[in-house]
Image (cartoon, rainbow, N blue to C red):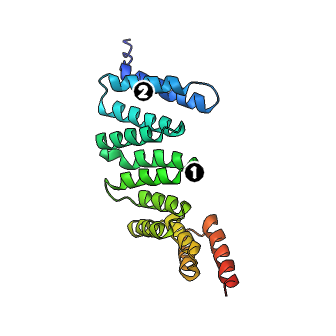
Amino acid sequence: MVRGKKKRISEETFLVESAMGEIYAANAGFGSIEVAESNLLEVLALAPNIKERVEALNLLAQIYAQTARHEEALERFATALAAAPDMTVQLTEGLAEMLENQREWELAIKIYTQGLASGEHAGLHNGLGYCLAKAGRFKDAEYHTRRATELTPENAAYINDLGFVLMEQGRHGEARALFERALHQDPSFKLAQNNLRMCSEEASQSK
């Protein structure tokens, strides 16, 4: 019986996979972000294919964001977007969500804005709206969360988020209607249930 040959991976793929392993290990308390960064920079110095190049740029952007080198993160992100516009949503959400976890709202806003420059997407509009609301920019947040609901009108999470933005502006009647609409789409949606209750309480107190 002839055994199948084991597929040989490229040096670039090996370095990317090694870097990913180091990042996961570092997040668990062992492993080295510095080693991961070095591996990824080596990938870019070689002749990677598009997939390997974009993955290296994406991981470097996340490393730089994680280590507060934000300008470098933005530069790597922009380069990755230019190389793979078809991956805009995946690249944007990955980096923006990391910045959200760090409460770096203005930087996450920049990332979402760059992503949306490549084309409209409901998830990116909603993510941008969420960060704008966290930054206290409710009028801008309203525009983007409303646009998300226009692009995907059946999405209960987007409807709820628009309701929250309106509630924060004291527009309780409009907000209540949106929370009820979200619950019509998903009756078990706990966040919308809580927001509806909060909205009703705030409305009664403001009378």
How far across and how far down the image is residue 190, in percent?
A: 64, 65
Helix, strand or loop status at disc 2? helix
Rendered view: 187 above or below 69: below
Q: Which mark is residue 202?
A: none
Given the image, on which type of amino acid does mark 2 rest? Leu
- The residue singled out by tag 1 in the image is 103
What is the residue that sits farthest to the bottom in this orientation? Answer: 207
Rendered view: 179 above or below 42: below
Q: Residues within 10 Å of mark 1 (few under 14, many from 20)?
A: some
Q: CA distance from mark 1 to mark 2?
A: 26 Å
Given the image, on which type of amino acid does mark 1 rest? Arg
Q: Residue at x 48, y 36 (%)?
A: 64
Camera sees residue 185:
no
How far across and how far down the image is residue 179, in percent?
A: 57, 74
How far across and how far down the image is residue 41, in percent?
A: 40, 26
Between 60 and 198, the one nearer to me in the picture: 60
Which quadrant is home to the N terminus?
A: top left
In the image, which is nearer the foreground, mark 1 or mark 2?
A: 1
Mark closest to the chain's N terminus, 1 or 2: 2
- Which quadrant holds residue 207? bottom right
Helix, strand or loop status at disc 1? loop
Rendered view: 157 above or below 44: below
Q: Residue at x 58, y 80 (%)?
A: 172
131 sits to left or right of 143: right
Camera sees residue 4:
yes
Rendered view: 163 above or below 84: below
Q: Which mark is residue 40?
A: 2
Q: Residue at x 57, y 51 (%)?
A: 103
How far across and how far down the image is residue 83, in percent?
A: 29, 39
Q: Residue at x 51, y 49 (%)?
A: 97
